[in-house]
Image (cartoon, helix red, strand yellow):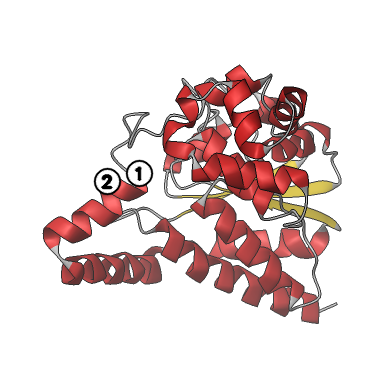
Amino acid sequence: MGLLIIRLITFLNSQAPETTNYHIAMTMLANYSNLHLISIGKIAKLCNVSKSTISKFARQLGFDDYLDLKDNAAFIENRFNNPLNYLSNILTSIETDGFDNYLNAVTTDINFLRVNLDFDAVDNIAKAINDYDNVAAFGLVFSESAAIDMQYKLAYNGKFIRTFQDDVIQEDFLRNAGEDTLIIILTNSGDYLTKQQIKLGTPRKDIFSKTKAKIVVISSNPVVKNFSFVDEALIFPHQTKYQTHSIMYQIITDLIVSRYRYFNSLL
């Protein structure tokens, strides 16, 4: 999934439908398959706004200008040569191997988690959430969905944490976070810590070497434990070819919130 479509969906999820920018975003999505070929004049006409309004909207989404937005518009499945993307790894495998194989893989990964989960790491994360007043949880796409899910789960227990779907706001928050802040990163591959995953060319990310926040990582990649800026890591390796992290996240965050509830009750 490309940077533009993620930012458009994120934008729509936080805007009132009657606004001009909401209409522009919806028009871009309606014409998404050809958007990389559409000039600023034509998209402005389709949206019934001026070219300057389109330029301002592009900048509001975090792009330099409309041309930069267009460069991120072409949808190419697995454009970054990642065989673990959702379409290739999950949907194509289900279509090829059948639904039963997929369910068996999910069961296998859950059973492995049951036996091998690092419960000390679960407790350490739960204690940190309990100890810090300022807590945030971030990820991208399905990992960000898990961060939002965790936000709601903790809110049910009186703990309010922050998360942002917008990748630009996430980076700003990381850049400005102080030592009094705990940030939980959900990243299946671990790449969120080192790469701009949804930007063209996946440029290197160095924001974590600059942040003063305490960084906790939930990942299937044990390499993240070696990063100097990672204070705590909970690892859940996959045992199958399927990337079942969206399901594993739900189980792991349930356990973390359960232990948070326990430690909070001791106060």
Quadrant placement of the N terminus: top left
Q: Residue at x 73, y 43 (%)?
A: 21
Question: Does residue 54 appear in this view?
Answer: yes
Q: Nearer the viewer, residue 257 or 93?
A: 93
Residue pointed to by mark 2: 88
Q: Nearer the viewer, residue 196 or 77?
A: 77
Decide: is 66 above or below 187: above
Q: Nearer the viewer, residue 124 or 133?
A: 133
SS for tag 2?
A: helix
Q: Residue at x 35, y 49 (%)?
A: 86
Residue type at numbered disc 2: Ser
Quadrant placement of the C terminus: bottom right
Q: Which mark is residue 121?
A: none
Disc 1 and disc 2: Cα gap in Å?
A: 6 Å
Q: Position of residue 240 (x, y in %)?
A: 24, 56
Write down the quadrant of residue 179 in the picture.
Answer: top right
Q: Is residue 55 left or right of residue 88?
A: right
Q: Position of residue 209 (x, y in %)?
A: 68, 26
SS for tag 1?
A: loop
Q: Is residue 219 left or right of residue 230?
A: left
Residue type at numbered disc 1: Asn
Q: Is residue 31 left or right of residue 82?
A: right
Count neighbours of disc 1 (C-alpha within 10 A) and say few if under 14, some if 14 to 19, many if 20 or more: some
Q: Is residue 195 left or right of residue 172?
A: left
Disc 1 + disc 2, Cβ < 8 Å: yes
Decide: is 64 above or below 111: above
Q: Nearer the viewer, residue 241 or 80?
A: 80
Count neighbours of disc 2 (C-alpha within 10 A) and say few if under 14, some if 14 to 19, many if 20 or more: some
Residue pointed to by mark 1: 85
Q: Position of residue 252 (x, y in %)?
A: 52, 66
